[in-house]
Amino acid sequence: MSLPSELYNAKFAEYIESLKILYLVDDQFKSICNEYCNSRIKTEKYKKKFEKNFRNKLEFENLSKELEEEILIYLIRNK
């Protein structure tokens, strides 16, 4: 079994050979690594959702401000 890609990062770079060996022979270490990888994957997933939701929030805030102005203009003209 190969090492998950999430473990290839700068923090572990100098320990990569030990990481590979321990991952293959130590079930407890492998379990910790797998939990770490799952956590990283979920972090990325929610980061993307957050960014998308934030963009949507900004779009709707801008739209509501524009519509608010249109309503005010309409009200003033039809007084």
Image (cartoon, rainbow, N blue to C red):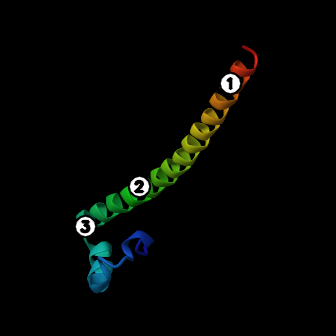
Side (left or right) of 55 relative to 74: left
Q: Secondary structure at mark 1?
A: helix
* CA–CA distance in space, label 1 to label 3: 62 Å
- Mark 2 falls on what kind of element? helix
Residue 69 placement (x, y as % from top left)? 65, 31
Between residues 10 and 38, which one lies in front from this camera angle? 10
**Badge 3 local density, few (<14 within 10 Å), some, or many (20+)?**
some
Which image quadrant for residue 62? top right
Query: Does 15 sit left or right of 71 as displayed?
Result: left
Q: Which mark is residue 51?
A: none
Label 3: which residue? 29
Q: Amino acid at mark 2?
A: Thr
Q: Nearer the viewer, residue 31 or 78?
A: 78
Q: Is residue 67 left or right of residue 31?
A: right
Q: Earlier in the sequence, mark 3 or mark 2?
A: 3
Q: Which mark is residue 71?
A: 1
Q: Quadrant of the N terminus?
A: bottom left
**Which residue is found at the position 43% from the left and 75% from the top?**
2
State the quadrant of the C terminus: top right
Q: Which amino acid, mark 3?
A: Phe
Please name the residue that numbered disc 2 is placed on. 43
